[in-house]
Image (spheres, helix red, strand yellow):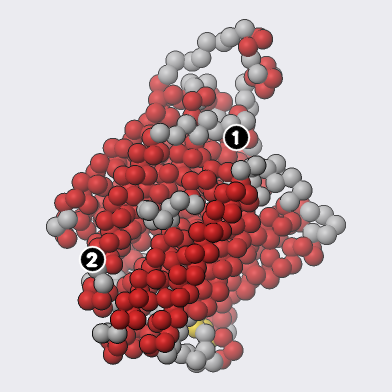
Amino acid sequence: MMIQNSPALVPLLLLAAAISIPVLAIKKTSVAYLVAAAASFCSVTISAYNMFHVWKSGPLTYHFGGWIPPIGIEYVLDSLSAFVALVVNVVAFIVLCHAGGLKGREIPGKSVPYYSLVLLFLCGANGIIMTGDLFNLYVFLEIFALAGYGLIGIGEKQAPVAAFRYLIMGTVGASFYLLGLGFLYIVTGSLNMADVRNILPLVQGNPAIAAALSLMVIGMGIKMAIFPLHGWLPDAYTYAPSTTSALVAPIGTKVAAYVIIRLLFFVFDVKFVSHTLPITDLIGWLAAIGILFGSVMAMAQNEMKRMLAYSSVAQIGYIGLGIGLANPLGYIGAVLHILNHAFMKGALFLVAANLRKNAGHSDISKLDASYRKKLPWSMAAFTLAALSMIGLPPTAGFFSKWYLALGAIDKGNWVFLGVILLSSLLNAVYFFRILEKVYLAPPPVQGPEEALSPKEKKGPIAEEEYSLMIPAVVLSFSLLLLGLWNANIVKGIIQRIIPLGM
């Protein structure tokens, strides 16, 4: 019975926990964090169980209310959805462990609504990943987005403006998706993904299908922040609370990327898409431009969170590049980069949070050699994650770029291959300038007492608490394990569900 219901357990558990937090935390607000952490841990456990079952026995399905699709709503866990759900929940739990160490410093008096929104955000993410119904996906997309707006708006003084910009862009994206879904429903008469896939070959010449495909992909492209639809992302990641940045950056855009992969390769089908519109080619070229644009903009930033935000635009481009290649190697690279970037960017944003907590800033220009002694573990975590972002073996980032490069060679697209290689050099430039300041520059000369800030007069900045240090270290050092195990991940999980027609 448990295994039959397991596809629906995680979204329902997270929704129930989110609703219960305001009630349970009436007398003691610290209960909010405990409930969120417990619900997240249970989500990881269930997701791991689901992944193991799918790997061993095949896909899982659940029909709400016993209604058989296409009439009823179906949840489907195959190798792809179970894998992405596990990645999302593992990263979210590690980030929440870090949030416990911050003890609500960035959200004073707001922990109850904040952690309710965190769980609603994760509920929406898991629902999007697991649903097999296109309209149910829209419902979870709205839950996911509304929670994200709130999580970002709780941050710094500029955060409400960034959240409002995200809200406007996100609403446009959701409207595009819904309008496209309306066109698709008019033609096919179904909202079930598997049923729509079976019907589409019968209505291939209908122009409404091309309109539906275009609108849905544009809508999700805004959510994914693929160039040039990324305008909401830099401010949102920069001004959000540290926990929000470390949560939304690894999860938010990756869930949208998953939806685009699901739509293009599993609902509309690769050959059908190529005959209807050259949309994968367009995604690939926009992604290539976005990789270079994001990398160049990251080089120009002095605020670490903003640098990481523009870096995310570039890294999202790698996923888009894999989608645009539309071949097995490109698909493997795109899915693998969803995993790798979630861990890489989560680790980097946690290090930025540690800098803000311990040094009072995350300004790159203020870094110097003293930080390698003040924050040795955080800087070690940053270094390893940065090397993975650049793509040095044996870190995980190397292998997703390797598959993307092989996909570009297989497709004969030498421009994409050149973009991958050039972007790695650009990544090295903006990450090595930080590493140079911390590890290679001479120690700063101690100035006169009156020249020091009040925080500096108290002595060296203490190393962060274990609750802040360990999550960043776990995420970054996991990149070595993911790199060493990449063949097992690719052969055991990703290759099991390469789309038909590739």
Q: In the figure, is residue 268 to the left or right of 250?
A: left
Residue placed most toward the observer, 343 or 196:
196
Q: Position of residue 265 (x, y in %)?
A: 32, 72
Element type at mark 1:
helix
Task: Say which quarter of the image contains residue 191.
Answer: bottom left
Q: Position of residue 441 (x, y in %)?
A: 42, 19
Q: Residue at x 33, y 80 (%)?
A: 209
Q: In the figure, is residue 91 to the left or right of 54?
A: right
Q: Within 10 Å of the Cα at label 1, are there few (<14), some (14-19), or many (20+) other Cα atoms?
A: some
Q: Amino acid at mark 1?
A: Arg
Residue 41 visible from this viewpoint: no
Residue placed most toward the observer, 415 or 376:
415
Q: Position of residue 48 (x, y in %)?
A: 50, 66
Disc assigned to residue 356: 1
Q: Amino acid at mark 2?
A: Asn
Q: Quadrant of the C terminus?
A: bottom left
Give the residue at mark 2.
327
Residue 191 visible from this viewpoint: yes
Distance between the alpha carbons at the discs numbered 2 and 1: 42 Å
Q: Residue at x 45, y 75 (%)?
A: 179
Disc assigned to residue 312: none
Element type at mark 2:
loop
Q: Quadrant of the N terminus?
A: bottom right
Q: Position of residue 335 (x, y in %)?
A: 36, 61
Q: Residue furthest right?
A: 27
Q: Within 10 Å of the Cα at label 2, are there few (<14), some (14-19), or many (20+) other Cα atoms?
A: many
Q: Residue furthest left?
A: 412
